[in-house]
Image: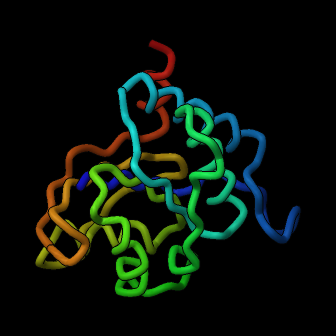
């Protein structure tokens, strides 16, 4: 399975809005990322996200930008911050039969889950900025030692979208 992992886009500070939705810059950045993903020919069998505002908005913008209905977005409470890697991966297990799954959530959970799937050794330091997109190839969500296919940061995704 290809697992596409993205931290939500830049959001408003908690002092400005308690639920921390995407900022205007964040919405624009995610729309550009979705355009790059479309140009790259990516597709998804499932779109999963944290139930928090920024992650939900990010997943919906990506879904729409890729030509999917926002109704295809599935929020999983186990993708929220402060969830264990074990609970996160267990919640995603019903989707492992799919070939391509998009997951949007928060750091450090997503980076830690990716590290867990990639390495049987020490935790990897993965630089997942807001709106960065990571692609892993894993046989299933129980296996370790998956393959890092690529990691694209927002500036790289902007260049792809502009092509």
Q: Position of residue 107 (x, y in %)?
A: 49, 68
- Residue 88 location, quadrant: bottom left
Depth check: 153 or 147 in front?
A: 147
Describe residue 134's horizontal placement relative to residue 54 as left or right: left
Q: Is residue 85 above or below residue 97?
A: below
Question: How many numbered marks have been drawn onto this rendered protein structure?
Answer: 0
Q: Residue furthest top?
A: 163
Q: Residue at x 32, y 55 (%)?
A: 3
Q: Position of residue 84 (x, y in %)?
A: 43, 87
Q: Is residue 139 above or below residue 120?
A: above
Q: Residue at x 53, y 27 (%)?
A: 35
Q: Position of residue 43 (x, y in %)?
A: 39, 38
In the picture, which quadrant includes the C terminus? top left
Q: Position of residue 27 (x, y in %)?
A: 70, 41
- Residue 140 location, quadrant: bottom left
Describe residue 33's horizontal placement relative to residue 153 as left or right: right
- Residue 44 location, quadrant: top left
In the picture, which quadrant includes the N terminus? bottom left
Q: Residue at x 68, y 59 (%)?
A: 54
Colouring style:
rainbow
Q: Residue at x 54, y 51 (%)?
A: 130
Q: Is residue 41 above or below residue 2?
A: above
């Amino acid at each position: 399975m290809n697992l596409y992992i993205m931290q939500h886009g830049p959001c408003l500070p908690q002092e400005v809005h308690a639920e921390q939705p995407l900022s205007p810059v964040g919405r624009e950045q995610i729309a550009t990322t979705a355009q790059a993903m479309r140009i790259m020919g990516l597709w998804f069998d499932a779109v999963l996200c944290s139930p928090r505002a920024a992650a939900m908005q990010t997943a919906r913008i990506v879904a729409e930008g890729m030509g999917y209905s926002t109704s295809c977005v599935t929020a999983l409470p186990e993708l929220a911050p402060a969830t264990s890697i074990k609970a996160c991966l267990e919640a995603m297990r019903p989707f492992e039969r799919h070939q391509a799954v998009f997951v949007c959530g928060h750091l450090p959970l997503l980076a830690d889950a990716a590290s867990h799937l990639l390495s049987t050794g020490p935790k990897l330091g993965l630089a997942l900025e807001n709106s960065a997109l990571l692609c892993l190839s894993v046989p299933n969500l129980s296996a370790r030692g998956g393959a890092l296919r690529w990691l694209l940061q927002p500036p790289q995704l902007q260049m792809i979208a502009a092509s």
